[in-house]
Amino acid sequence: MPAKFIAKVAVPGPFLTPLDYLFPAGWNLTRGCRVEVNLRNRNIVGLVMDIDRQAECDPEKLKQIERQLDETAILSSQELQWLQWAADYYHEPIGEVIFTALPKRLRSGEAAQMQGQTVWRLSALGRELTEDELPKNAKAQKRVFNLLKCSAKGCNAHQLSDVSSSWRSVIKKFLDNDWVEAYQAPCMQNTPTEQSPRHELNSQQQKAVRSIIDAFGQFRALLLQGVTGSGKTEVYLGAIEAALQQGKQVLVLLPEIGLTPQMISRFEAYLGQSVAVMHSALNDSERHCAWDAIRCGTVSVLIGTRSAMFTPFKNLGLCIIDEEHDLSFKQQEGVRYSARDLLVRRAHQLGIPVVLGSATPALESLQNVHLGRYQYLQLSARAGKAVAPAIRLLDVRGEKVQEGVSAALKAEMFKHLQAGNQVLLFLNRRGFAPVLMCHDCGWQANCPSCDAHMTYHYISVERGGFLQCHHCGEQLPEPSVCPQCQSSELLKVGQGTERLQQAMEEWFPDKKVLRIDRDTTRLKGSLQEFTRQAESGEADILIGTQMLAKGHHFPKVTLVGVLDIDQGLFSCDFRASERMAQLLLQVSGRAGRAQSPGQVWIQTHHPTHPLLVTLIREGYSAFAEQALEERKLAKLPPFQYQIMVRAEAHDEIDVLNFLHSLKAGLEATQTTWSKDDSQWKGAVVFWGPVAAPMLRRQGRFRYQLLLQAPQRAQLHTLVTELLPHVYRSPLARKVRWSLDVDPAEMY
């Protein structure tokens, strides 16, 4: 037995393969353990991918592992194999993929097992206390006391912070008075909860649930297409309940953080047990706690956004991805993975079913149905007594539109509001006005770092407003005069949600207007509070961006007004019309979800556009078939496969030199292979390098090179062959570059 073994360790950085390190033979080191290693004179955390007796280089030149961090593997062999597949498919360094999959605390070297948490509960003396015995003006004390009174097992810091920001001083006072007691509890427990009444499933829902249950124990991808309001969540819950009865765990992915609170409450009430949550709004401890609870099997259901997909499960039996078409499932920075595609791959590897749900499935998913790869399930009608809303195209050509709202839509709003209903106005452009322009010389406020206009944001009459670039985030004060001609005639051109809100408050002074966009929901808990007000009917007019378009249930909304949808009809991105159709039907689905029938009025300057007419008259399925036929004729995805190479730098010449060099290498490799195999001749087509639609962003010039082929294998084989040379190229060190496999956006 040799004195030392060799561990192949994945570390963050531009290393396409793990690095070799020595460790003593007496160590109990296995695959999937974290270790501390020295790299370039600093200690970092790495993960052991394999144990070997052979090194890639002279063992005498290898460093020894500094420290073993885990006694047992934190990732199983199956999970490592899946992550290795992801690294190979997306052509990313294995260490970058591994550390994308781990919570921040584990990347920092902290213990994998989460420590317990402090919980406070009322003592015997505190349970005898009444609210009236507390000081009259002590509102924080009363809120904390009432929360503890309703929680037999007590409350943790996160729960207490939801009711009062000053909860720590309140708890200290209660401890001093012996009204509460503290104890240590696991960071997360599977606490039984009171189950809510069950709704009887209709025949289509029952059939869908049965199809999912029949797939247990085997890989099957099921595409569940259900119109908005058809009860897809009820289908998910029915399938999840069956999986839990078989002792399995379940993963549910959602597109937006804002959808998780209402989904959590609904799932816990239906299933009668706690669910774990994972998304970017949680702090590091909360994410680590959920990760550990699922890995250990303490909790059986995990709900989260795309990063939750990487969580290791003890016994995963079912995967669900809701709104599978949503762009947010595609990571746009770092490792540019598709959560939908990776989840399907994970389910395939584990031999379990995966459900992809949407009212407007991606064209790629529908094509997989046509090819027999996915099983198709349909919910064609709304659940209960609700009916689909009536959709009307409103021709605004030549009409004087006031604050973005036509006279006909304004009159219809009056009718619905007078009847006591809610109105939702959809405008996918936040801010007050997208352009600030000088009336005298035509100057426009442009971002100094990007090729884009700065959006004007209004604060108040006294304070005026400010300019902000929605691409790089830079802010500038509102100018009092034009910097070019010194004129004071500065016009705020265009429509944003802030301006629309101001107009609605002037038109309907007796109605409450609620604006929901990224600007109004920055504070923690604000989105939940706003959606609560919308769902309860406290607000009369709802104004919002695409944050309001999906997943929310507003029972009193009977009129939806879509103010500007035309930008989706004409775009440099070939997916723009698909996204327009999906967004349009999603926001339309907010109308008429209860007893009252709903209406959707869509303002457009192109009422005869073929795709728009097909969508409104024949529905999304007909639109999708027409769009797929166009894609096939144009040789675009899903009938071709693409990889986008993006590069940016402060020096424009460096970017072009890098991309031209890369293209030359790819073309030369393909030409060489063509001599031995004629199938390679022209198999991969190269488009570019060309400037990105926004050439300059954050002071960097951006260009892109598109690779396209009819077969994935040809595309990936060519890139794999050349990639090691790219990493070693001096040109690659001068630019910031990335590979985007199956790009979802052309920007």
Image (cartoon, helix red, strand yellow):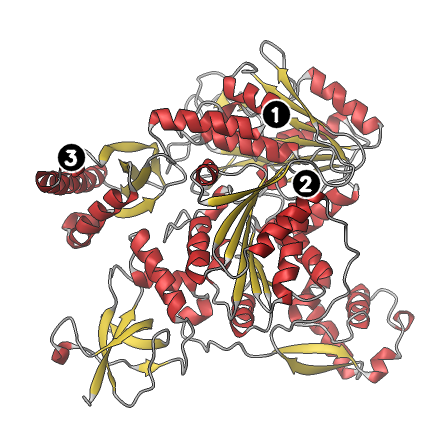
Picture layout, residue 341 above or below residue 488: below
* Position of residue 340 measured from the top left corner of the image (x, y, whole percent): 46, 49
* Mark 2 crowdedness (10 Å alpha carbons): few <14, some 14-19, many ≥20: many
Q: Which residue is mark 3?
A: 681
* Residue visible at 32% across and 57% down in the picture: 87
Q: Which residue is mark 2?
A: 230
* Position of residue 15 measured from the top left corner of the image (x, y, whole percent): 24, 61
673 sits to left or right of 148: left
- Viewport quadrant of the C terminus: top left
For mark 1, give the secondary structure: loop
* Residue mark closest to the camera, 1 vs 2: 2
- Viewport quadrant of the N terminus: bottom left
Sequence-wise, the earlier of marks 1 and 2 is 2
Sequence-wise, the earlier of marks 3 and 1 is 1
Residue type, numbered disc 2: Ser
Residue type, numbered disc 1: Leu
- Which is more toward the observer, 480 or 633? 633
Q: CA distance from mark 3 to mark 2?
A: 49 Å
Sequence-wise, the earlier of marks 3 and 2 is 2
Q: Which residue is mark 1?
A: 563
Q: Quadrant of residue 501?
A: top right
Residue type, numbered disc 3: Lys
* Residue visible at 22% across and 73% down in the picture: 20
Q: Is residue 644 visible?
A: yes
Picture layout, residue 245 above or below residue 236: below
Q: CA distance from mark 1 to mark 2?
A: 26 Å
Q: Is residue 432 visible?
A: no
* Mark 1 crowdedness (10 Å alpha carbons): few <14, some 14-19, many ≥20: many
